[in-house]
Amino acid sequence: MGLLIQPNRKAVLVVEDEPLLRMMAMAMVEDAGFEPVEARDADEAIALLEARTDITIVFTDVDMPGSMDGLKLAAAIRDRWPPIEIVITSGHFRLDDSTIPARTVFFPKPYDHQEVVATLRWMAGV
């Protein structure tokens, strides 16, 4: 049985260093009708964004190991890939519009999956 290709599905990059949380976020993204793409940290996320042109939304945690956290990743995305929408989440920080890039939505953990899915669909225009 072959892999079902859905070329019109929009890709969402999930950036989360905790394997279980990343797996849950990937399932949420897929259940919402998007193609989930995973990255363990910001460095891997940047490499994927450089290699792929189909990623329309990035869903990232703030607290991650590596050269940059989720806030720095969001700023880099806004600078290098302005059309990409961004969702930031954190269980340790509370962020508001003054601390996140333009056109970015913040959800504190634990987040409501239905609210996140509705936001992803709104960002994707579906």
Image (cartoon, helix red, strand yellow):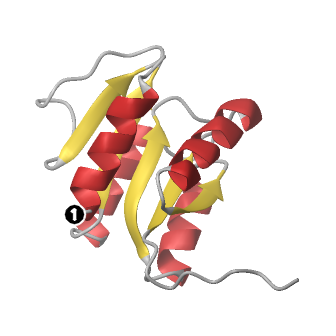
Residue 27 percent location from the top left of the image: 63, 45
Count of picture labels: 1
At numbered mark 1, what does the secondary structure look like: helix, strand or loop?
loop
Residue at 44% in and 24% down: 90
Q: State the residue lying farthest toward the front.
A: 1
Q: Nearer the viewer, residue 110 or 121?
A: 121
Residue type at mark 1: give it.
Gly
Left or right for 79, reference 54: left
- Residue 75 showing in the rendered view: no
Residue at 21% in and 63% down: 125
Above or below: residue 100 compared with residue 121: above
Q: Quadrant of residue 119?
A: top left
Left or right for 42, reference 59: right
Q: State the residue lying farthest toward the right.
A: 1
Above or below: residue 28 compared with residue 20: below
**Disc 1 designates what residue?**
125
Residue 116 percent location from the top left of the image: 37, 36
Q: Quadrant of residue 89?
A: top left
Left or right for 45, reference 83: right
- Indicate the quadrant containing the N terminus: top left, top right, bottom left or bottom right: bottom right
- Residue 33 showing in the rendered view: yes
- Mark 1 burial class by Cα count in 10 Å: few <14, some 14-19, many 20+: few
Residue at 41% in and 23% down: 112
Above or below: residue 88 compared with residue 76: above
Residue at 67% in and 48% down: 40
Residue 126 percent location from the top left of the image: 27, 62
Residue 80 percent location from the top left of the image: 30, 70
